[in-house]
Image (spheres, coloured by chain):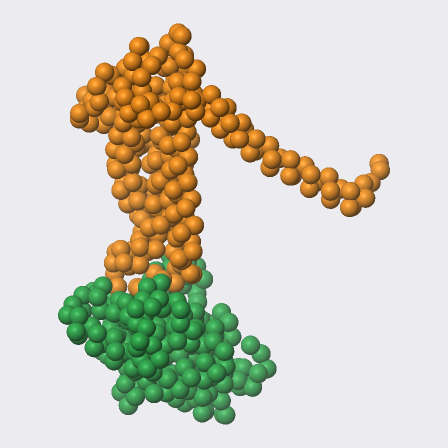
Chain colours: A green, B orange
Amino acid sequence: MAIKIQIKNFNLWYTDFLALKNINIAIEEKRITAMIGPSGCGKSTLLRAINRINDTIEGVRTEGDIIISGKSVYDSRADVEVLRRNVGMVFQRPNPFPISIYENVAFGLKVNRIESKKSLIDETVEESLKSVLLWDDIKHKLKKSALELTLEQQQRLCIARVIAVKSQIILLDEPCSSLDPVATQRIEELMLQLKDKYTIVIVTHNMQQAARVSADTAFMLLGDLIEFDKTEKIFTNPAKKETNDYVSGRFG
Amino acid sequence: MFKLNPKLSQKISYSILFCATILAIIPVAVIIFIIIKNGASAITWEFLTSMPKNGMRGGGILPAIIGTLSIVMCAIAVTLPIGVCAAIYLNEYAKDNLLTRIIKLAIVNLAGVPSVVYGLFGLGIFVMFLKLGVSIIAGALTLAIMELPVIITTARGALNSVPYSFREASLSLGVSRWQTIRHVVLPNALPGILTGAILSIARISGETAPIMFTAAAFYVPHLPTSAFDQVMALPYHLYIISTQIPGMPKNIIFGTALVLLMMVLSMSLIAIIARIYFRKRRKW
């Protein structure tokens, strides 16, 4: 398997607070990698470092680098916008724009001027909605506001929005935390389908979810990467005591 | 010391709070009542559409209405774009540093300057230094500067009310910061910005001091033909006819006040209706 995302000696500060301490991870392509750990351990911060969305927070400073497909993410010449198109992100609460379903999916294409021919945009919208298994439910109401969809559908729409700009990597930041168990299961099924085409990194609070969907799991604690290994190993026979305490439910 | 029983003290506090609230609406009601009672008889189609006669003791107030409308529209046309741009900069781009803090402090202070000081400032800068003369444009620029901090503040409020998650969603799709502002933030902030602008129009329509030295004339026998003309304006006209002209019919004074009041109130009403409409449509 090829390495898609290489995180190298990565440190991140929020002003004076060191939130990520010398992180090294190699994430493989077309697999699901989970990041687990108690609240405040830095897992979301690390995820948000991969597409540099942390840059929008004042006082964030980094050291070290992340390499995606052989290219430095934190190089001063790196194009953040191209990076973010390539590395899509789905957030905790579904955040569709308050415009139509169609316009939501077409948004990235239109605003970034990736595509301007209507027929091609239509095609991409359809493909993207199909790949998140939303097309059949909503093809007759593409002009309706995206806010009328259920939360699960909204979250699928947010994934479709990412797929439409031809991302290769999808970062999911606790994507099911505002969904009910049935919806959660269906999103998990979707993730498993998407992993054949996309490299997926998911941050989750839910250890069962990590165990169910991911191939590799990183366990973090207080800004440190404690252990990174095959998911099966992390959950059945972890090398570190802290990992064992966490996955067996002794804290967190 | 005796202690009130809690039920009684609850009732007393409630009554005091309720009375304070009622007291706030009494002046508004009384003002509107007096002005309508004394002024309604003056309001005719002719009053609204003809020139003053008899040294303003008769005829209509058309030039004052036109004058006020032109000054106010020019003022808002200048101040709205500048104010919105400044609000976007402060809200979306500015880092929290010394310069930003100085700018914010300046805006707060600008809002606290008495309006007559703006009038003198306008006289010095626009009328005399820039040689615009006493004119619509000089008055409009003076009002524009006076209203700038209000526009900036309301526009910032509107921008701030757009959820941060929309910005994040857009940025994470590789959309640049400016395109995010243009395609996501501004469309969603627009209703708030517009209602703020309408309220500003209502507010500056009634201002007297800033236009007294910069735009308004005692009497102009014709309607304005360019932005460099002096004009009559409703608030100033009202001041003149109430204090400077002996033997002024009372109903014309109150009629003029009524027209001004209706202009201001109807604009506030439009803003309120617009706000209700947009709030209903908004779902986040």
Q: Quadrant of the C terminus of chain A?
A: bottom right
In this rendering, is residue B85 above or below B37? below
Q: How many marks?
A: 0
Which residue: 39% across, 67% down?
A147
Residue A249 vs A11, above or below: the answer is below
Q: A47 or B232, which is in the foreground?
A: B232
Q: Say whether residue A49 is visible.
A: no
| Front residue of B183 and A11 | B183
* Farthest residue, direction left: A117
For the point 37% across and 84% down, the residue is A190
Q: In this view, does A233 lie to the left or right of B207?
A: right
Q: Residue placed at 64% from the left, 39% from the top?
A: B18
In which quadrant is the N terminus of chain A drawn? bottom left
In this view of the protein, can residue B30 be seen by the observer? yes
Q: Is residue A191 above or below residue B174?
A: below
Using residue B252 as the reference point, say whether residue A5 is left or right of it.
Answer: left
Closest to the observer, B218 or B10: B218
Residue B106, image x, y percentages = 37, 35
In the displayed structure, does residue A94 sit left or right of residue B22? left
